[in-house]
Image (tube, rainbow, N blue to C red):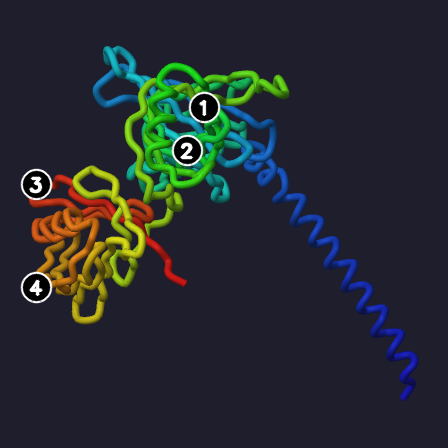
């Protein structure tokens, strides 16, 4: 047998196979790439981009949509309800995601918005199941030739810090960072912040009503989004924005109390923070009221929750006894629960929110 001849034959067959595979790959990608590039063009080119159009409305002549997408995956959405009188314009902020040929808008609104990406660069509104709406009515937004900016006017939630006469606001839903203008009700926001800040430049969660407009940076002259505060609403020093698009589990999670009866919680030195853990094993409740350990049980069914057999240790504390007593009283009245991201809210029989907690992942 001639091994040399066999080796040459095998190399020849292998080279022919490689050429055939390359040819198949070229044909395959040539067939697929035009469609893929059409779908990708919406997202990867020309930021910022805007889309607009008038879509159907159940009880008005139509809703004017204007959507801004930014390169950092944040978005602004403006909805104007035609012929609906005062307060007919609403704003939604959040982050956008692309799932193949769909554009999905992620926000704190339980009804998420999604669009089909069309080959011509426009987008078509989908229903809540991310399925095309079977109708002859227009549900398409046109991509604008030039960027049409949206300037939100609303209550904003974000982490605020202040140092050397300069305020920075990191908005929770978009993750964008804005300078805060030294005008309007900014002084009230600064005063509220300084009342609770324990160290220089500490970031605290605040709620502030106002609007966004472009202003020139005093150092560089570059135009940048700036927050003008028209009303300083609230501050929640024990809270953070949390993670958008992810809901924590109710059970087996360490829940730190951040608000009680719509008041921020203060944690005192050398005392434990008020907290709860609802263990799945034997429906056990444990935690702290900020002064003493809490133990007991709970009954859970869907969105209904009731605590029972609540007890605690009996140590006296120099501070925080009023908060501890109010927490026990609140637990007795709890009937409903809901989770928004990493925040748990407990409500009474009428649905009134009595307390808010934030999930903490212990090391």
Residue drawn 79% across the image and 58% down it: 19
Q: Which residue is mark 1?
A: 180
Residue displayed at 43% across by 40% down:
199
Assign a secondary structure to mark 4. strand
User: Contact (CB < 8 A) between labels 1 and 2?
Assistant: yes
Q: Residue 100's x, y, as percent?
A: 50, 44
Residue 183 falls in which quadrant of the image? top left
What numbered label is drawn on residue 71?
Answer: none
> How far is mark 1 from mark 2, CA to CA?
9 Å
Q: Earlier in the sequence, mark 3 or mark 4?
A: 4
Rendered location of residue 148, percent (x, y): 49, 17
State the mark number for residue 350.
Answer: 3
Q: Residue at x 28, y 54 (%)?
A: 273
State yes or no: discs 1 and 4 in contact (Cβ < 8 Å): no
| Circle number at residue 309 | 4
In which quadrant is the C terminus drawn? bottom left
Q: Which circle's residue, 1 or 4, is located before the other in the chain?
A: 1
Label whose residue precedes the other's in the sequence (1 or 2): 2
Give the CA distance from mark 1 to mark 4: 49 Å
Q: Nearer the viewer, mark 2 or mark 3?
A: 2
Dot placed on the residue nearer the N-terminal end, 3 or 1? 1
Residue nearest the viewer, comparing 239 with 149: 239
How many angstroms separate mark 4 from mark 2 (CA)? Answer: 41 Å
Q: CA distance from mark 2 to mark 3?
A: 33 Å
Above or below for 71 versus 100: above
| Mark sitting on residue 160 | 2
Between residue 339 and residue 217, name the one nearer to us.
217
Left/right placement of residue 278 relative to residue 224 reads left
Q: Is residue 162 left or right of residue 81?
A: right
Residue 308: image x %, image y %? Answer: 8, 61
Left-right relation of 12 to 142: right
């Amino acid at each position: 047998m001639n091994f040399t001849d066999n080796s040459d034959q095998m190399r020849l067959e292998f080279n022919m196979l490689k050429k055939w595979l390359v040819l198949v790959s070229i044909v395959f990608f040539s067939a697929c790439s035009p469609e893929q590039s059409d779908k990708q063009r919406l997202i990867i080119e020309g930021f910022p981009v805007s889309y607009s159009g008038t879509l159907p409305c159940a009880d008005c002549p139509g809703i004017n949509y204007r959507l801004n997408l930014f390169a950092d995956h944040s978005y602004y959405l403006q909805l104007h309800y035609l012929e609906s009188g005062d307060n007919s314009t609403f704003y939604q902020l959040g982050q956008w995601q692309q799932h193949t040929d769909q554009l999905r808008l992620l926000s704190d609104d339980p009804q998420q918005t999604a669009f089909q990406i069309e080959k011509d660069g426009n987008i078509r509104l989908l229903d809540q199941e991310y399925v095309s709406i079977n109708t002859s009515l227009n549900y398409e937004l046109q991509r604008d030739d030039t960027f049409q900016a949206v300037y939100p006017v609303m209550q904003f939630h974000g982490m605020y810090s202040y140092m050397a006469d300069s305020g920075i606001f990191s908005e929770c839903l978009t993750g964008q960072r804005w300078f805060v203008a030294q005008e309007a009700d900014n002084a009230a926001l600064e005063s509220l912040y300084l009342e609770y800040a324990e160290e220089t430049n500490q970031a605290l969660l605040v709620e502030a009503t106002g609007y966004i407009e472009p202003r020139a940076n005093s150092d560089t002259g570059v135009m940048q989004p700036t927050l003008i505060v028209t009303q300083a609403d609230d501050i929640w020093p024990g809270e953070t924005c949390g993670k958008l698009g992810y809901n924590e589990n109710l059970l087996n999670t360490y829940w730190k109390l951040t608000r009680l009866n719509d008041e921020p919680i203060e944690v005192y030195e050398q005392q434990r923070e008020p907290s709860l853990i609802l263990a799945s094993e034997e429906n056990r409740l444990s935690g702290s009221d900020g002064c003493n350990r809490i133990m007991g049980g709970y009954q859970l069914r869907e969105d209904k929750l009731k605590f029972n057999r609540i007890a605690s240790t009996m140590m006296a504390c120099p501070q925080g006894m009023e908060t501890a007593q109010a927490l026990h009283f609140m637990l007795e009245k709890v009937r409903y629960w809901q989770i928004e991201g990493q925040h748990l809210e407990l409500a009474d029989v009428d649905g009134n929110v009595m307390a808010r907690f934030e999930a903490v992942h212990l090391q």
